Image (cartoon, rainbow, N blue to C red):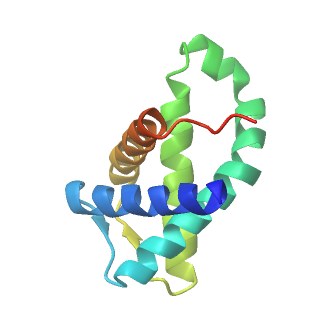
Amino acid sequence: MRLLLRWLVTTVAVAVATGLVPGLRAPGGATAVLVVAAVLGLLNALVRPLLVALSCGLIVVTLGLFYLVLNALLFWLAGWIAQRFGAGFVVDNLWAAFLGSIVVSLVATVFDWLVPEPRD
């Protein structure tokens, strides 16, 4: 249930980013946003740990700011994958991906504040 809720939050966050950030477009509509949210979730689960491990030196040297670059790259990659599969989501450039990833992160953080993790 938590996974489905996280996917819906990411979907809303991507929709908000698409509305706020110039350079992000979803001509495919809600389907495109749903696909990008799913791809972004998969990339964050599968690829992000590898990228963090490979770039741990840069993360330390930049005091964690390199995480923003990693988020932007994963967002850009998610948009590219979704576009290649015909979902109709466009990320114009890395700057749009950077701003979009910040918006998605902020919306997810607000969600985490509002809905705490269930305790066993």
Q: Position of residue 87 (x, y in %)?
A: 48, 83
Quarter of the rendering containing residue 78: bottom right
On the picture, is 62 further left or further right than 119?
Answer: left
Q: Quadrant of the C terminus?
A: top right
Query: 39 left or right of 69?
Result: right
Residue in the foreground of this view, choosing between 97 and 42: 42
Compared to residue 11, the image places residue 94 above or below, namely above
Q: Residue at x 56, y 39 (%)?
A: 70
Q: Which residue is drawn at the image coordinates 50% and 37% (left, top)?
A: 69
Locate residue 8, reporting x and y percent: 49, 63
Residue at 41% in and 37% down: 114
Residue drawn at (52%, 64%) of the image: 37
Q: Where's the N terminus, which quadrant?
A: bottom right
Q: Residue 52 appears at what percent x and percent y?
A: 71, 33
Towards the viewer: 39 or 91 = 39
Name the residue furthest front.
120
Q: Which of the 4 quarters of the picture holds residue 30?
A: bottom left
In the rendered image, which quarter is residue 111 located in? Answer: top left
- How many numbered callouts? 0
